[in-house]
Amino acid sequence: MKKYKRIFAVVIDSLGAGEMPDAERFGDKGTDTLRHISESVSTFTVPNLQKLGIANLHSIDKVSPVDSPEGRFAYLYEASNGKDTMTGHWEMMGLRITTPFKTFTDTGFPDELIRELEARTGRKVIGNKSASGTVILDELAEEEIRDGHMIVYTSADSVLQICGNEETFGLAELYRCCEIARELTMKDEWKVGRVIARPYTGKKKGEFVRTSNRHDYALKPFGKTALDVLKENGLDVISVGKISDIFDGEGITESNKSKSSVHGMEQTIEIAKRDFHGLCFVNLVDFDALWGHRRNPVGYAEELERFDVKLGELLEVLREDDLLLITADHGNDPTHTGTDHTREKVPFLAYSPSMKSGGRIADADNFAVIGATVLDNFNLKMPDGTIGSSKLSELRADII
């Protein structure tokens, strides 16, 4: 059976599709990111997702199932103990996380960590709470610029973020402080998934703008992933968005930073117009960062509509021996309480111009079917100690 030459795996960051069986344990009973978004707007138009079968898989207000869907579709249930970005993506590539990464959303970072960070960097920490990155700049950036202090904050993710004005704080100093924070947060009791440098420009409230010189200091995956196997066997592993940061560059052969989710899709379309052999792995973060965490279902719906337009452009340039996989890494129901991610199953849509028909395929009890399917396509096996089994045969077989 002929295999695909190129696989595109696109992660719509946080597009959950209904509560997991254990959602109540995470405080997320009744969540459904996709359905609740569609119910929150007067119009919702996603014709390309619709023709691939998204509404045949999941009940979506204002989007009807189609008689002859062009894609194959199923739900994926998370096997790992968590609901964050790194957990979801690492699981896609075969790693099951049993101990969740540390979050400090409700309390801020412990006094001992802050004291050590101040002593090592020589700067006083201000902030130390969960906050929106733009809101905390309006609140504290003038003080940071005036007094030489350092804004440290977190979010619902497992992150420690440090802001620095590019002109007064300096990028080199910001990166130095983040490297120290990364070293300190390798302790088990403080171990966050990422330390993020958040540079900005501007002099006063209302003028502050975050720049593209962000840098993530992520944990390395604790074991070999499907990405490593692809790279070791001479295949291309092209990342778009924050994929390379999530895996700390492990298993990546080419990295493309994105300015937005629309930009990420534009980059993916350009990559699809050139030759490569392997995987293009894409993360589109705006759904989560701009709309889910800020509990804005209208903005989320509009972002999905913008994505759908770009999806149509990508579909037009796919080749007969291409495979497109669309999924998510967790939920972030903007109608739910708080600002945290939500414990949800995720959609799995698969399409190739060579498919003769679409339809429902079996659900999976893990996200690692993504990596397993990719490796199976290239006649490779998942690394020892990983999870996941391939759905390639279900994607290649005719559906009656």
Image (cartoon, rainbow, N blue to C red):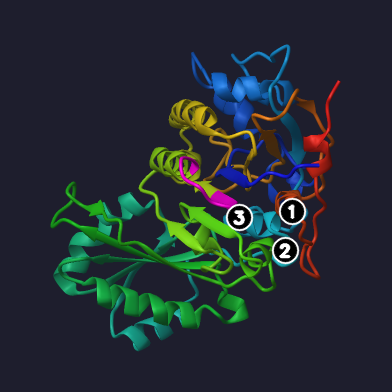
Position in image of residue 361 (x %, y %)? 82, 32
Q: Tell me, yes or no, whether the highlighted magenta stretch contains residue 230.
A: no
Q: Amino acid at mark 3?
A: Asp
What label sits on residue 368 in the rendered view? 1
Q: Tell me, yes or no, whether the highlighted magenta stretch contains residue 279.
A: yes
Instruction: Report helix, strand or loop for mark 2.
Output: loop
Residue neighbourhood size for the residue with mark 3, other residues' Cα within 10 Å, grouped as few (<14), some (14–19), many (≥20): many
The residue that label 2 is drawn on is 95
Q: Which residues are magenta?
A: 272-281
Q: Nearer the viewer, mark 2 or mark 3?
A: 2
Pointer 3 or 1: first along the chain: 3
Position in image of residue 218 (x %, y %)? 51, 69
Q: Amino acid at mark 1?
A: Ala
The residue that label 3 is drawn on is 84
Labels 1 & 2 near each other (Cβ < 8 A): yes
Judging depth in this view, the residue of 357 and 127 nearest the camera is 357
